[in-house]
Image: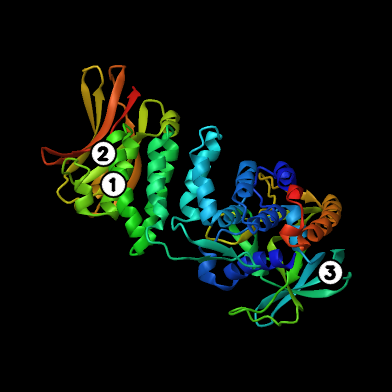
Amino acid sequence: MLLRERRQTLSTFPSLQDAIVETATWRLARLRNPKLMLQVLSIGWSSRRQYGAVIAGLGTPEGREVVLQRIGDASAPIAERRELARLTASVGLIYHWYAEIDSDNNVRFKSSIDRDNSSYITRIVRLSATLADEEIALALLSGIRSTVFSPGLPQVEVDLEKATTELIKFHRATRSARVRFAIESFISQRRGANDFARLQIRSKPVLSLATLDTVETSKVPGTIFVNREETWLQDRDPITSVVLVLEAIDGGPTYVVPVVSDKLQKAEAGRGVNRGDRFQVPPGIRHGKYRVFFRYMDGNVVAAESYSFETLL
Amino acid sequence: MKRTVLVCAMALFAVATTPTLVLAADLEHYNLDSLVYLSDRIVEGEIIGSRSLGVSVVDAKISRNLAGIGRPGETIAVALTDLFRKSIGSQEKTTPLTKGDRLFLFLIPARPREGFSVPGDGSVLMPVPSGLKLVVGGKAFPFFQRRNPGGYIAQLPVPGRLAPGEDVTQLRAAIADSWKRALVWHEQFKDAPFQRKQQSF
């Protein structure tokens, strides 16, 4: 009740923290009742300190189970499920870690031995593969990338091996370009060449994803703003240019727009690069639906193409 | 109460005592209820000088005691005020707080820690995070971290620019109201959480 009342009185701008809410949330976190933490999240959190309390309160095996169950509960509000998916990694991917909260609200993790991490990461991947909501799936996949911070932990590596098999199944089954890119990037960066080969994708120097930024695009008429995510599998040196391709869906003309800013970009194998660029839509373009993607050129040879999106131009 | 205060104060302490951390810290900004709740003492006062007591402190003469112990005319030593600056003319130019500046101060005792050598007897005070308001012309102006890196800055009104100030009379009344509520919260939070009904949250 206190949290709800205080939530209503919080000012919107400038955003100010509420120490009473934070204190109450840390007290609730100490009760180790995950469902209570979900209630706090449903009310909404107002500061990093309060968010930290929620994460600590969920930082037990029981908490992790409740989080996964709730994410998979189709009857739960989608915003709450997305929020939980985003915090999964923060709650911790090592299943038997237990967040201890001391009297000063400092959090320390205690661990017990577990051979295969109770297949927690594998179960996260399985769950993400069953969800209709792409945002939740991507948030979960993004979360498991944080395992780069725990390399060499035997139980995590055992779990990741199984999870990789699930990821490859998911990669084959999904039609989502964003999900496929996320899986490819994760496996290339975290699992190595042998597992990456199991994805059976064509050899290329770079994994790439093009997505439309609708907000930025709407700001300047006659342009589109396209985000580009890359994971480089080889050094970039052989690539001589990158172009944006606007390919008419109905078989009409294809337009090619150079990516001017790319001249200065360097990238090495294993590196991820994210950027966004605004492109002038070619004057006189025939109105219609287009498939939009990046093409990476090695001289006159197409070395790679990004995943695409479709949009009306 | 003390636990929460300590944690918040430690965060402020950390950014204040390590210059490199100041460059990379998002400072905390609390609403009025929270400033009152976190404070042991709330006073209005004027800076009358500065000196070193292991760390740099300002001396402030209390003009009005609003909550906790204290009396008008008393001089208190306050550390960590160098985290707070005021804007002059434009947002880009700032200057430290200085002699003659009038403030609302939300205070707790400063405790010595590594790199922060204040006397351990509680004789030096420090503001809770974001716990100063600068008084100019009957208005009290809050401090905000405009950008990270950077400390708290009070944005004052200049010709052509409005700044959000609170009427000091109304602010005093609001602090008095908050103080009553804070006493209730302190009482409520005194028990271990399992000793209270969960519904009360």
Q: Which residue is mark 3?
A: B62
Secondary structure type for disc 3? strand
| N-term mark: 2 or 1 | 1
Q: Position of residue A131 (x, y in %)?
A: 42, 35
Picture residue at 34% right of the left edge, 44% below the top: A275
Q: What's the distance in space between the residues labelled 3 and 2, CA to CA? A: 64 Å
Residue, x 49% and y 61% (percent of image)?
A: A97
Q: Are marks 2 and 1 on the same chain?
A: yes
Residue with the mark numbered 2: A259
Residue in front for this viewpoint, A191 or A142: A191
Residue on which disc 1 sits: A165
**x, y percent for residue A75:** 54, 32
Report the quarter where the N terminus of chain B lies.
bottom right
Q: Assess whether mark 1 and mark 2 are in contact (beta carbons under 8 angstroms).
A: no
SS for callout 1:
helix
The residue furthest left is A300
**Residue B87 makes an appearance in the image:** no
